[in-house]
Image (cartoon, grey):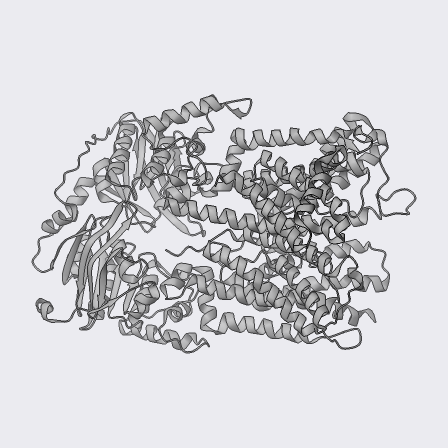
Amino acid sequence: MTSSATVEPIIAARRLVKRYGRFVALDGVDVTLYPGEIHVVLGENGAGKSTLVSLLSGALRPDEGEIFVRRESVDLRSPRDGKKAGIEIVHQHFALVPSFTVAENLALASAERTGGVLNVGREASKALEAAADLGWDLPAEEAVGRLGVGEQQRVEIAKALAGGGAAILLDEPTSTLTPGEVQDLFRILRLAKGSARAIVLITHKLDEALAIADRITVLRKGKVVVTTEAEGIAPAQIARWMVGQTPPELQKEAAPLDGEIVIKASGVAVLGDRGRSAVDGASLTVRKGEIFGIGGVDGNGQLELAEALVGIRPVSGGTLETEQRPAYIPQDRHRDGLALGMSVQDNLLVEGHRLPALRRFGLFLAGAVRAWCETLVAKFQIKTSGLDQPAASLSGGNQQKIVVARALASEPAAIVAMDPTRGLDVQATAYVHRTLLDASRQGAAIVLFSTDLDELAALAGRSAFMSGGRLREGGDVAEMIGGRS
Amino acid sequence: MKTWLIVPLGLLAILVLTLFAFQLPVGESLKLLFEGAFADKYGVHRTILKSVPLILIALGIVVAWRAGVFNIGGEGQLLVGVSAGAAVAHIFAGQGWFFQVFILVVCMLAAGAYAGIAAWLYAARGVNVVISTILLNFVAIYLVNYLVRGPLQEPTKAIPQTATLAPAAMFPVLDRQTGLHAGIFVVPIAALLVWLWIQKSPSGFRLRLVGQNPNAARAARIPVTRVSVMALVWSGALCGLAGGIEYLGVSGYLFDKFSPGWGFLGIPVALLGGLNPFGVVLSGLYFGALFAGSRNLEAFGSASSSLVFAMQGAAVLGFVALSEYVRARSIRGAA
Amino acid sequence: MSAVPGLIGATLSLGTPLVIAAAGEVIAERAGVIDIGLEGTMLASAFAGFYVSEVTGNPWLGILGGIAAALALFFVAAHLILRQAADQVVVGTGINLFSLGVTGWLFVVLVGKTGKLASVPTIPKTAGALALNPLMIAAVVFVFSSWFLLKKTRWGLAARAAGEAPFAAEAAGYSVIRLRFQAMLYAAFLAGIAGAYLSLAQTSSFAENMTEGRGFVVIAAVTFGRWTSVGSALACLLISFAYGVKYLTLSLGLAIPSQLFDALPYLLALAVLAAAGRGGIAPASLAVPYRPK
């Protein structure tokens, strides 16, 4: 691809900016895609990769900047516009209808809109043929929900290929695949790029990037660090680009290996919402004063395991022993954490309403409740105009502080935290990290689920990774990052 | 504008618009309405009596809706409650306050159990509460229709209604001219108890949390289904109480049109009261006053008696639109 | 055995509005919108149909009036449900109460208390116990068209995707909001015809709350019919048979309380809902508000 300078680019994004409130997800990003290249966009979680995908797909609109398709400026207002402009996306969470057959899913996405009357067979045929050309025999009449993850992804890729787009973006495509499936995917992508198509692979996995990329763009904290030819680049160099030079500020302590065991799971199996196996034989032991990290890409059974650990989802196999039910910092504070329409006080009471000290004769003691809440607001530095302020009107960081505050209020012996810093700015993140470390120093056993490797590296003593419902013991996080690069 | 002002001003606006639509002289009508509801003892007592069942039903609606359980079955729960109360009253044929409390408890138990059918269908079979409670309304209406022509019919079998209670079996009358009875004191007590429960107790807190965000409640290990079931059963019990008070205080017998749609009217009353127990007392008195006052408008034609129903309709949709608007704005503000 | 044609006739006549409304509701639900306000919509249409027929003397214009009333409520519901992403149950309940209050009032205002006298021109029907009318044929057509729309058109595929996995529909280039809007529009159109049928074919007048829960019965039937057009129609006929049985027992003079038969359709609807249970077959995103990014 040394000739790229002379070839007309398929897509050029110029100075893209996307903000969420005060948080800048993308800060002036330039990306250029040429025909016949596999372009890997690398970055840690939170670097802005997903936002970039959303902007290029039309799911979100940039606050500033422009996107050019074959030198023409386009305004992508919806995924429909993105498809029209020739940009196909293979989403990390597949855009498939589980109850539809493979053929119906392909027909749904098909560009061959043959009038009003539906002919599933014909409209799916192009995608099925495209898949067959690559050596995939997709089961056209099978419901997609009954297929394995790898096969579902093939349906997604077949959709994208049949769409005839000049560019295909794959968002973290390897996150749920077995090593064999990854090899097969890469083989297919090399075939599919041909000479006219650009393939973009979004990932945080360095070794995979080097295995397939023609060119690499590294994102960090919403900015492009570098765009370069992949050949001859040392992995260690890329790792430095991704992580930056900043050393972790936090001083975690060596995990006491002889501490009292607080959480012990052996061979735990948990079912997901639709009755399918979500966690398959997870074993872990967490001791007093230890932070045990669990990494991995979202949707690999972390939520179900966390809910089983805190006792709100039944365990379908194996044994789980906890000294007492762990306090819970749920992953999605808007979905599972807060009642946005209720006041700060009520949201703090979500855990505290059980405290005997706060009630008498079955009624709350108003004074005691306020004092208890005010103590928490002060201790956890929650910025609020008063206890009666609705939680909805707080900033994300202060909302998260409420969730953290009430979980830690009663100094629990065990804590399960999921992505406790998702969407928080630097200061709020540092605050949550400090708080968790303090809790562990005071003897709490903490299970920290995080999709952010840096976070695990900074906080966790031992770590494991989840993939496809299985928990793989990873040992020391620092080693894991070292091994990665 | 202050939020609390929106409701009374909105209600006044809707009232004026409705009068306008009825082609009634607005100023004159407002004056007559006000006089009919408040000018003298008769008006005031009439307003209170009309508002009693509305407030009690609305309290029941508050309990369920605050838990996110949309009970629309107040009408059926009330009717089943009174049916049981009337049956037991005739079996025991007692009198005095002990008897009256006993009958009220029977009404509440039966109505609560009837709501419990919908609660069970929801908890065990996932049946939408709105649909099951409304279907049960019709079953209850036909049940009463049958009872007052069958097993519970008065001894002479001449009219489709139950035998009338002896005056001593009914609530003491406070004013012979207006029929004001001692049962009205149940209303402030019930409102206070519901308020203490919903707003001031851990159990009520769990109920509100389940209504606001069941996912967050679940994450906090609150048994969401059990809380919903309990809310619906208590909601039914309060509707049964409304029927019992009316039975022991006003009619003394059960008949086909025992409830002129209180079970449905209770919903707008509850919504306009902001789903708050004390707000419900105010909005119940407002609707009671409209009922009482609209009598005075009959000089202007028969249509005016359905004024309240028209207002009810307009008010509900206005309320839904308004609250959705406020909610959408607060969520946007948070994002 | 002379009661048999009467029973069949009653089942068909009483079942027709249910079948028509269900043919629309099934589309709305498959696209992810449960129309709790169907009861109120049908009631408003029954009144509008009655009133237009009375004023114009033409029952077919009455049917158009019923459709117009349903569409008016549809715009309110669609705005709240789709634009504001409001809770579908709350909005539907609002529509029901609004319709109950306003039709009751309009009836008194426009027709006066002497409503019994107002017998309006109705849809013609065949003589004899079967008493067939053209809308029965229309009902069959609507069931077929709903089936065809859902199963045989690209729009149906997209609408079903909107009810199952809105994200997938959106990624395939469709607007979930638009699909749901169209599905609700279709459902409202049929609800309008079904409502007007009540006052223009089943009876020749209007009475307060004359729908008597039929809107909810239809929703129950759609659940029992497993969200298929044909299944929902059959479930409607099963329930209308329960309505019809009453006439059979009346003519046979059985000593069973007639109220039991009055209540039977509702009990049956409850039973089918309980029997249908949660199941995994409901559209996965039914009644889940969709908020575009």
Tell me which corner region of the image, top left, top right, bottom left or bottom right, holds residue B44: top right
User: Is A296 rendered above or below residue A213?
Assistant: above
Q: Residue at x 21, y 37 (%)?
A: A458
Q: Where is residue A440? Give x, y as percent.
A: 28, 29
Q: Where is residue C74? Give x, y as percent.
A: 55, 61
* Viewer-proximal residue among A356 and A136: A356
- Judged left or right of residue A84, residue B127 is right
* Viewer-proximal residue among B9 and B189: B9
How many numbered discs, if any? Answer: 0
Q: Residue at x 54, y 71 (%)?
A: C147
Q: Where is residue B25? Give x, y as percent.
A: 68, 50
The residue sitting at the right extreme is: B156
Tell me which corner region of the image, top left, top right, bottom left or bottom right, holds residue B151: top right
Q: Residue at x 11, y 68 (%)?
A: A4
* Viewer-proximal residue among B251 and B169: B251
Tell me which corner region of the image, top left, top right, bottom left or bottom right, holds residue A170: bottom left
Q: Examine the rendering and report whether any part of residue A337 can be seen.
A: no
Q: Examine the rendering and report whether any part of residue A328 can be seen.
A: yes
- Judged left or right of residue C95, residue A73 is left
Q: Where is residue A337? Give x, y as percent.
A: 40, 40
* Viewer-proximal residue among A330 and B309: B309
